[in-house]
Image (cartoon, rainbow, N blue to C red):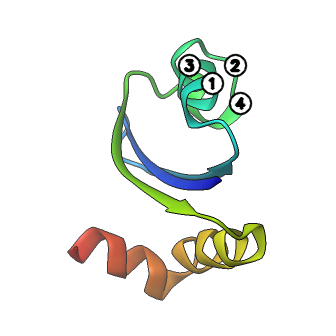
Amino acid sequence: MYYVYILFCSDKTYYVGLTENIKKRIIQHKNSLVDYTKYRLPIKVIWIGIFKNKKIAANFEKYLKTGSGNAFFKKN
């Protein structure tokens, strides 16, 4: 399984990521092991999507990082 996730950071920015191990990845974020989020703690998980296909997950992650994808997740 592949997970696309959205985090809300303390500086009011969002982080969108893709991983195969969501529990491990969230722990990495919370323990300051990810460059983008280590200075933006605490973080809050606001959404996790589960995909069986890596290519579809990667395409969705890429979409969420676009202007229209960003507007989509903020609206929903």
Q: Which numbered mark, 4 or 1, is in the foreground of this view?
A: 1
Question: Mark 3 highlights which residue?
Answer: 27
The reply to whether callout 2 and callout 4 are in contact (CB within 8 Å) is no
Reply above or below: 57 against 10: below
Badge 1 element:
helix
The kind of secondary structure element at disc 3 is helix
Q: What residue type is labelled 1?
A: Lys
* Label 3 close to label 1 by CB (< 8 Å): yes
Measured in 3D between alpha carbons, the distance from the residue under mark 3 to the one under mark 1, in whole angstroms, is 5 Å
Specify the amino acid type for callout 2.
Answer: Leu
SS type, badge 4: helix
**The image quarter in which residue 55 lies:** bottom right
Q: Mark 2 points at which residue?
A: 33
Label 2 crowding class (10 Å Cα cut-off): few <14, some 14-19, many 20+?
few
Q: In this view, does 18 lie to the left or right of 50?
A: right
Q: Mark 4 points at which residue?
A: 35
Q: Position of residue 18 (x, y in %)?
A: 66, 53
Q: How far apart are marks 2 and 3 (CA)?
A: 9 Å
Residue 35 placement (x, y as % from top left): 71, 30
